[in-house]
Every structure is written in C-alpha cells, then in structure tokens.
Image (spheres, rainbow, N blue to C red):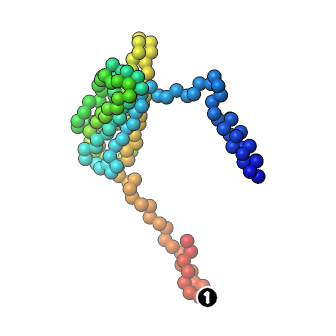
Amino acid sequence: MIRLRQFVSLLFLLLFLPMEGQATPPKAPIEMRLTGPALPAVEAPLPIVLSVTPRMDAPQLRISFHLPEGVRVIDGAIEQVVSMDAGETRLFTLTVNISNEGEYRFIAGASIEIDAQTKLSSNADLLITIGKRNEKPTAPPQKRFRTKEGDAVME
C-alpha cells in the first residue's frame, strides 16, 4: 500500500512540475490588489484602495479606476500617471459615495507603455454589496408531530 502511495505521489510530481527547458508561467508585470470597506453603507464615504507593485521600473505607470453606474467620486483621481521603481508598493485611494443598495463592481487598471507597440497591463476588481447581503435567511417553521413518548420536532 505504501509503495502505491509513493508511486502516485511521484507520478503527480512528474506530471505537474515543469521539465527542463519548459517555461514557467510568467508573473503579471504589475501586482495589484483592490480592497474596500468591510461594512459599506449607503450614503457613507467608501474608500476604495488600490495597492500597486510594478515588477519593473515604470517611469510612466498609468493608474485608472473604472466605476460602476450610480457611484459618485468624493475624493481622489480616477486616472493618473506616476513613476515607480521595480518592487516599490504604493497605495492609491479613491473615496466614493453610493446612494442605493445593490451590487457594485469596481475595476482598477495599471499599464506601462514600453514603446509604441508594446504595453503591459494588469487589472484588479472588487465587488461591493450594500444592503441585503447581511440579512440572515429565515428558517422554515418546524413541523411538530406526536409520538407515544411525547412531542418531537422534525427538522
């Protein structure tokens, strides 16, 4: 039994490890993460924070936020161009206001233009739900029935 497990483990490793000469999948040229408030509320300022780390020097890094319909910007820039060094991490905050309950998908993008024909880019998205998400569904009523020993509840 142990030999079979060892064989299966070895087979798994051989199938999924890159062989010599095979390329490993490339990492995104720009590492990004988009976050928002834990408990968003209607008509309250909502900070949307984008963390950006380019993997190469980016003298002309274009940052942009794409907002869903019904969202109003209170503070921050929807689009800007900055200079960043490889490995440097910077936070970009956009404070918005949402006036209705619902689901809102935010998308942020960052791109580096290498030359006229080459552009490297990455995207991050965030789904914010305001309203009914936190309500617990009501349980159906329990059914009671009589037995010889007494009452019982069927679940």
Residue count near mark 1 (Cα–Cα under 10 Å), binned few <14, some 14–19, many ≥20: few
- Quarter in which the C terminus is drawn: bottom right
Residue that lies at the very extreme toward the left in this rendered image = 75
Measuring from the top left, give residue 28's x and y in whole percent: 47, 28
Q: Is residue 78 above or below residue 131?
A: above
Q: Nearer the viewer, residue 37 or 29?
A: 29
Residue found at x 38% / y 28%: 87
Horizontal side, residue 20 vs residue 3: left or right: left
Residue found at x 74% / y 51%: 2
Residue found at x 55% / y 80%: 152
The residue tagged 1 is: 148
Q: Quadrant of residue 18?
A: top right
Q: How many marks?
A: 1
Q: Is residue 135 above or below residue 47?
A: below
Can I make out residue 104 in this image? no
Horizontal side, residue 102 vs residue 150: left or right: left
Q: Quadrant of residue 138?
A: bottom left
Name the amino acid type tagged 1: Lys
Q: Nearer the viewer, residue 44 or 114?
A: 114
Residue found at x 35% / y 29%: 88
Q: Is residue 45 above or below residue 30?
A: below
Q: Nearer the viewer, residue 98 or 57?
A: 57
Q: Quadrant of residue 136?
A: bottom left
Measuring from the top left, give residue 39's x and y in whole percent: 33, 51
Disc 1 element:
loop
Residue that lies at the very extreme toward the top in this rendered image = 116
Can I make out residue 119 in this image? yes
Horizontal side, residue 79 vs residue 4: left or right: left
Measuring from the top left, give residue 62's x and y in whole percent: 34, 23
